Amino acid sequence: MYAQASNERLTKWLMGAILVIAYAFLYMPIIHILFASLSSRPNFPYPPEFDYGSYIRLYTNTVYQDAFLNSLIIATCTSILSTVLGFLATVGVLRFGGRKALLYAAFFAGPLFVSEILLGISSMSLYYLVFELQGNMVTAIIANSVHCFSFCFLIMAALLYRYDWRMNEAAVVCGASPARAFYEVMLPLTWSGILGSLIVAFVLSLNGLDISFYLLGATPTMPSVAWGALRYGVKPELYALSSIINILVFAAITVLYFVARSDKKRPME
């Protein structure tokens, strides 16, 4: 009995040590960037000597500001467009797909397995050679939406798979319009999946380089500016901007966690 208890404690400590090592491996680069952005010696910020000069210079650096604004515009528009299309596609497949629903779902999930580089190159060729459209913010948003659509579709499908469509029919029978049935019956039960799709698409398009690189040209975005800084030397302002983006991403993940947690506490009848 004593030997068994000792083995259980040893296993528990070993698993805890592995967990700590795994988390350290994942988050040490992020913590290092945060220290570098707050240090007067960004190249080696240990021991830390806190200084906010990089954030002050970031406030006056128009290149990084424009890149951050462009990335926010692309990420916001992409998340909205891909979530709306993903929701409509999921409803169509699960509600009206019938026996071929699995086949339709496989086609909608197909872009998930296409490399971002190939998607960027093919989108550039399609818009320029076929439609004679120069690369701009609109084409970048469309291409990023194609990439994020599959993620949104799978998230919504995982939620709507257990949705009882008879509730919408019952609401219509009771006199509600289809729009009112959606807002008062379906939306309260599916809003967590919609919000999750928005957050996932926002994060993916905010950090994406390959697709926007081929479609925006000289228009700066955060990933392209960061990639260019590696060739000419990383400036402290980039550390500060990276820290801000990391904080935004972690905030979005935290919101998604609490949304998923609250959704589990409210089972779908």
Image (spheres, grey):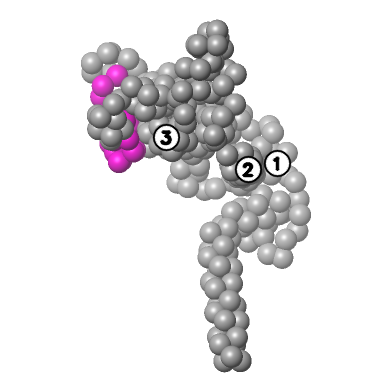
Across the whole image, how many numbered discs are drawn on residues? 3
**Which circle's residue, 2 or 1, is located before the other in the chain?**
1
What is the chief secondary structure element of the magenta stretch? helix
Depth-wise, is mark 1 or mark 3 nearer the camera? 3
The CA span between labels 3 and 2 is 18 Å
- Secondary structure beneath dot 1 equals helix
**Which circle's residue, 3 or 2, is located before the other in the chain?**
3
Residue type, label 3 = Tyr
The CA span between labels 1 and 3 is 46 Å
- Write down the residue under mark 3: 161
Residue at the spot x=26%, y=21% of the render?
126
Indicate whether residue 245 is drawn in magenta.
no
The front one of 268 and 146 is 268
Tell me which segment is drawn in magenta. 108-127
Return the x and y of residue 110 as percentages of the image width and height: 29, 35
Return the x and y of residue 41 as percentages of the image width and height: 68, 57
- Write down the residue under mark 2: 265
- Write down the residue under mark 1: 55
Is residue 15 shown above or below 105? Answer: below
